[in-house]
Amino acid sequence: MKTPQDKALEQNSKAFFESLCAFVGEDSKREGIESTPKRIATSFAEMLDGYAQSPKDALGSVFEDGVCDEMIVLKKLPFYSMCEHHLLPFFGFISIGYIPDSKLVGISGLARLAEVFTHRLQIQEQLTAQIANALMSELSPKGVMVVCEARHLCLEMRGKQRQSHIITSALRGLFKKDSKTRAEFMQLLNNP
């Protein structure tokens, strides 16, 4: 049974798609694309479901027993997100490192936290900072570093169609203050 929101989303998707087809000179009633508005609604609902999730809930259980004071690294987690300027994908890898103080979270919690922010309309710089800020806020660790490497289809598919490889980083706490801590994280990322 469809909810009122589902019905509204389908109607809005259909109106959007018909306008887009008229703009580019396509027949929105053509057999091959007649179900496209529904597919668009479903796709965007899945790709942008991060708004309905909180960072705290995504992290899941936070542990205080067995907390270590060594760096914990999640290396090269694949991600997909949507550019807020062009509604085109950007994708790549996110690496997260943190040094616990009194709270520890499971590695799957780090992956879910990244998904909260990648499943929103984004720019890469903001995405990187949001993950770091959420970890600082929820875990109060000694430090956090997030590195995001991505290709942007808004650059590669439009205009001069240039290849892209954009890297952003966010440093908090010890990672910002101590060059040795930063170097250790980068060494761990660069080791095969």
Image (tube, rainbow, N blue to C red):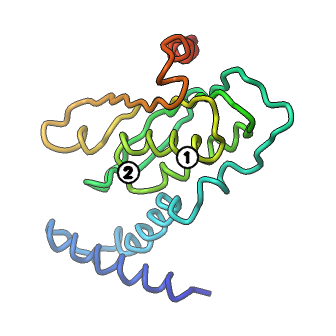
Give the crowd class for mark 2: few <14, some 14-19, many >=20 residues within 10 Å.
some
- Residue 70 rendering spot, x and y as whole percentages: 70, 20
The amino acid marked with disc number 1 is Ala
Q: Is 4 located above or below residue 49 in the figure?
A: below
Q: Quadrant of residue 18?
A: bottom left
| Label whose residue precedes the other's in the sequence (2 or 1) | 2
Q: Is 178 located above or below residue 15 in the figure?
A: above
Residue 162 is left or right of residue 166, and the answer is left
Report the Cα–Cα distance between label 2 and label 1: 16 Å
- Check disc 1 and report the residue beneath it: 134
Q: Is 130 located above or below residue 188 in the figure?
A: below
Check disc 2 and report its element: helix, strand or loop. Answer: strand
Residue at (55% x, 46% y) in the render: 134
Q: Quadrant of residue 129?
A: top left
Please tell me which residue lies in front, 5 or 72.
Answer: 72
Please tell me which residue lies in front, 97 or 85.
Answer: 97
Position of the C terminus by quadrant: top right
Residue 18 is left or right of residue 114, and the answer is left
- Residue 106 rendering spot, x and y as whole percentages: 74, 39
Position of the N terminus by quadrant: bottom right
Residue at (56% x, 34% y) in the render: 77
- Residue 68 rendering spot, x and y as whole percentages: 77, 25
Residue 172 is left or right of residue 63, and the answer is left
The amino acid marked with disc number 2 is Gln
- Residue 126 rendering spot, x and y as whole percentages: 38, 45
Give the crowd class for mark 1: few <14, some 14-19, many >=20 residues within 10 Å.
some
For the image, the number of numbered tags is 2
- Check disc 2 and report the residue beneath it: 122
Residue at (69% x, 31% y) in the render: 100
Check disc 1 and report its element: helix, strand or loop. Answer: helix
Nearer to us of marks 2 and 1 is 1
